[in-house]
Amino acid sequence: MRNGGKRPDMAVKISGVELKNPVMPASGTFGSGKEFDEYLDLNRLGMVVTKGVADVPWKGNSTPRVAETYGGMLNSVGLQNPGIHHFIREDILFLEGYDTKIMVNIAGRSIEEYVRVVRALQNQPVDFLELNISCPNIKEGGVAFGTDVDMAYQVTKKVKEAAKQPLIVKLSPNVTDIVAVAKACEAAGADGISLINTLLGMKMDIKTRRPVLANTFGGLSGPAIKPVALRMVYQLAKEINIPIIGIGGIATWEDALEFILAGATAVQVGTANFRNPRAMIEIIEGLESYLKEENIDGIEELIGAGHESKEENPC
């Protein structure tokens, strides 16, 4: 649809909640916004996604726990956080001062831990919950919730029953069948899916002849994972009926647009924030300029446009 010279509409809706634009940080790369406040105006973001928070403080993994690698970075921070009660007193109070939506990423090592965090947030000024199911389930020998279809269903169902806010489930790409996991979460009541979380990787130090990370393995993020993330978003857009938030290697507005065309309603920017604290603002401005140049009324017109059927070449 042509906009006739009007300013394009950047707003998108997820589970009935309107965001002023589809751009937000990825959990764990932005704190809760305080660290970036001097570099960008948080009011311009569609949403702020907070660092992961558990029911009690988590110390995190031993150092070194971050390493640069070709096309990205590895991290094994281990979801270090001060616990939900400190988070409510400090982080939510800070974010309330801005005109942007708030999504809290929640972590846990058992279903009961997740539920305790959700209950603590029931009456807080929070717009969305993001359920990190890449955490190890201590009751199942450390297997991540998100790598088992039944566990993904069970934790989503229990958390959804306790939640008052819409629930977005963040999926791990370290699985054989991402569609099966996403469908299980949808069947359990998830209001949306965010993906991908990091890919499992490692780096060796050729001088010490040992792994660089103290934890040996870490999560790979950055441009290197973008093709995998884009493929998974495209796959899910054809298989599920709830909104998708795309994550993985997004550093420019062109990257963000690719995910939207693949079927993402919104996007999260992670590793790029470390290199360029203004990356999200530049992405928002780039998307808006693209809409103007193409005379498109609003960004929502482009969601999933890459799935439009094309006439097959008979040769």
Image (spheres, helix red, strand yellow):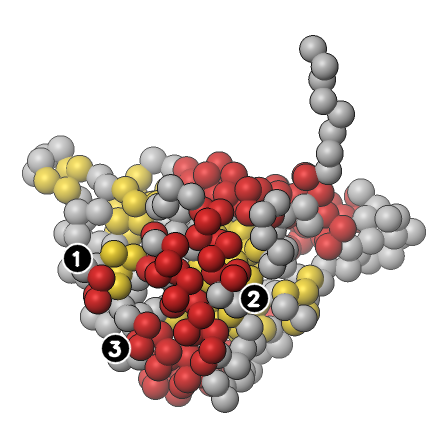
The front one of 95 and 243 is: 243
Mark 2 is surrounded, within 10 Å at the Cα level, by few (under 14), some (14 to 19) or many (20 or more) other residues, namely many
Query: What is the quadrant of the C terminus in the image?
Result: top right
Is 234 left or right of 136, judged from the image as shown?
right
* Residue to which mark 1 is pinned: 63
Which is nearer the N-term, disc 1 or disc 3? 3
- Give the side of residue 111 with respect to residue 294, left or right: left
Residue at 34% in and 35% down? 70
The residue pinned by badge 2 equals 191
Q: Quadrant of residue 273?
A: bottom left
| Whether residue 48 can be seen here | no
Q: Secondary structure at mark 3?
A: loop
Q: Quadrant of residue 79?
A: bottom left
Viewer-side label of 2, 3: 2
- Secondary structure state at the residue bearing disc 2: loop
Badge 3 is on which residue? 57
